[in-house]
Image (cartoon, rainbow, N blue to C red):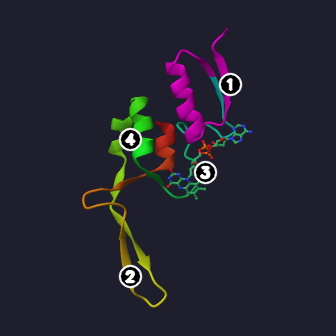
Amino acid sequence: MKKETTIIGAGLVGSLLSIYLSKRGYKVTLYERRRDMRKETMSAGKSINLALSDRGIKALEEIGIIDEIKKISIPMHGRYIHNADGTTAYQPYGNEGQFINSVSRGELNKN
Ligand SMILES: Cc1cc2nc3c(=O)[nH]c(=O)nc-3n(C[C@H](O)[C@H](O)[C@H](O)COP(=O)(O)OP(=O)(O)OC[C@H]3O[C@@H](n4cnc5c(N)ncnc54)[C@H](O)[C@@H]3O)c2cc1C
């Protein structure tokens, strides 16, 4: 059986899957309706950064690009909630020293 496949959509999932399958010997044809964001200035589709945690990090490790992505990751240790009465409350994302990573979707997609 010929190892060929077609993926529609070069968002986060389509891009990752196409790299996985290429590494497994598939010839992948990837279609994306937007223009090539590596060549033009454009939005990655959603306005806020992606919060990257263990599962995403593991996937990026497996395809060998985690070191590049770490360079553009901003650690987020927690968030502040602004209550209606004007007070604030800090909510940590983990134990002390733990954090999730804020990554630009566009830069992640381009990598
Ligand atoms: C507001 C918001 C915040 C989020 N925040 C987080 C977060 O912090 N952390 C996290 O892990 N997840 C987050 N998610 C979820 C995450 O964004 C999605 O799980 C992820 O983007 C899904 O990837 P995808 O490749 O399936 O879809 P998308 O990233 O949406 O990519 C789909 C791609 O397919 C293309 N496409 C669509 N139709 C066609 C067509 N007919 N032909 C060709 N191309 C086509 C689109 O142009 C696009 O590039 C968030 C989602 C939203 C909406």
The image quarter in which residue 35 lies: top right
Give the image location of residue 65, x and y in percent: 39, 33
Real-space Cα separation, disc 3 to disc 2, in angstroms: 31 Å
Real-space Cα separation, disc 1 to disc 4, in angstroms: 26 Å
Q: Is mark 1 within 8 Å of ligand 1?
A: no
Tell me the amino acid under the disc marked 2: Thr
Q: Are marks 1 and 3 in contact (CB under 8 Å)?
A: no
Q: Earlier in the sequence, mark 1 or mark 2?
A: 1
Q: Are marks 3 and 2 in contact (CB under 8 Å)?
A: no
Give the image location of residue 98, x and y in percent: 29, 56
Q: Which residue is mark 4?
A: 69
Provide the residue span drawn in magenta: 1-28
Q: Which residue is mark 1?
A: 6
Q: Earlier in the sequence, mark 2 or mark 4?
A: 4
Q: Which residue is mark 2?
A: 88
Real-space Cα separation, disc 2 to disc 4, in angstroms: 32 Å
Residue visible at 54% across and 20% down in the picture: 22
